[in-house]
Image (cartoon, helix red, strand yellow):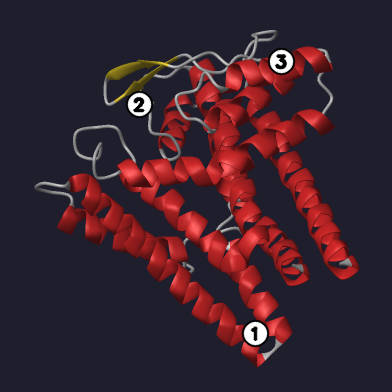
Amino acid sequence: MIGHLISITIAIILDKLIGDPPSWPHPVKGMGKLISYLDQRLNKGRNRQLKGLWMLMSVLVLTFLLSCFLVYISYQLHWWIGVIIEALLIATTIAQKSLKDAAIEVYEPLQANDLVLARRKLSYIVGRDTEQLEEKEIVRATVETVAENTSDGITAPLFWAFIGGAPFSLVYRAINTCDSMVGYKNDKYREFGYYAAKCDDIVNYLPSRITAMLLLLVSRTPFHSKKEAWKLLFQDAKKHPSPNSGWGEAVTAILLGIQLGGINYYRGQKSDRARMGTALQPLGKKHIIESTKIANKAVVYFYLFLFIGGIGFELANAWS
């Protein structure tokens, strides 16, 4: 457990300083190629749901075995080599710097009143149509993306790294990558991506809720009383079509005094998403920056939560 905590600490620092340079090798790139290959080979004909399960299990087993082998060999060489290798692997599964940088890349052209560039930058990080969005909707889409991915891209992989080190963190990232590539409810992927989507819901269930509740617990809520804020969180989080994404959006909306959700278009198809929070102030460019600050706070307090839990576990183990 202590080794995991040290590895997690180093991983957070590495991601904060370096992030994911595009030219560097990255496990997710390999996962993506394997998923794409299996998708092309298996996603046709009959029994697509079972074929999708086979695809998912193949990716997860391969990821787990390779990461376990690498970590095992590293620890055999020296304990500190094992810790550092685990830290490097865990760092590839978290995206604090990447998430913040992506949000800033939308914020900066908005500051320069360049809606065309802001829309293009936004299109890199969201699935919705962005070509006709005005400033308010660009801001909303960016804030929603930061809010959703605070758990998916940062605290959830840290949670699984705490439970099972780098192998569990990488397996989580493999599940998340499968879901992002095939977990759609359209004709092509409704059956093939069924298990990938369900598995992603399961592994994000606890991290998303812990993250949102920790944020509400440690943050000032200038727009609501604490009692109202907690009531709103549990009321709004369940409105989201995803069983987990609503928690990040709801707590962000509550803390910023804004309303998220609304009309989105995906490939021309209208989608009316449930509203999160209360519009106590209009959405503005500043809320992009404020949402990244909330994400940063989530990482700090989630890390402290894991650290205290890990030390408590070690003390209990020593006492027993």
Real-space CA distance between mark 2 and mark 1, rounded to the nearest whole angstrom: 47 Å
For the residue labelled by badge 1, is the local secondary structure a helix, a strand or a loop? helix
In the shown orientation, is residue 186 left or right of residue 195? left
Residue 312, by quadrant, is: bottom right
Which numbered tag is attached to residue 231? Answer: 3
User: Mark 2 is on which residue type?
Assistant: Asp
In the shown orientation, is residue 50 left or right of residue 252? left
The answer to whether residue 43 is above or below residue 237 is: below
Q: Position of residue 85 (x, y in %)?
A: 62, 76
Which numbered tag is attached to residue 237? Answer: none
Q: Which of 235 and 218 is in front in this view?
A: 235
Residue placed under numbered mark 2 in the picture: 129
Q: Position of residue 179 (x, y in %)?
A: 39, 45
Q: In which quarter of the image is the N terminus?
A: bottom right
The answer to whether residue 207 is above or below residue 14 is: above
The answer to whether residue 98 is above or below residue 105 is: below
For the residue labelled by badge 2, is the local secondary structure a helix, a strand or a loop? loop
Which numbered tag is attached to residue 75? Answer: 1
Mark 2 or 3 closer to N-term?
2
Instruction: Give the residue at x 61% y 31%.
Output: 248
Q: Where is residue 203 in the image (x, y as percent from the top left)?
A: 52, 47
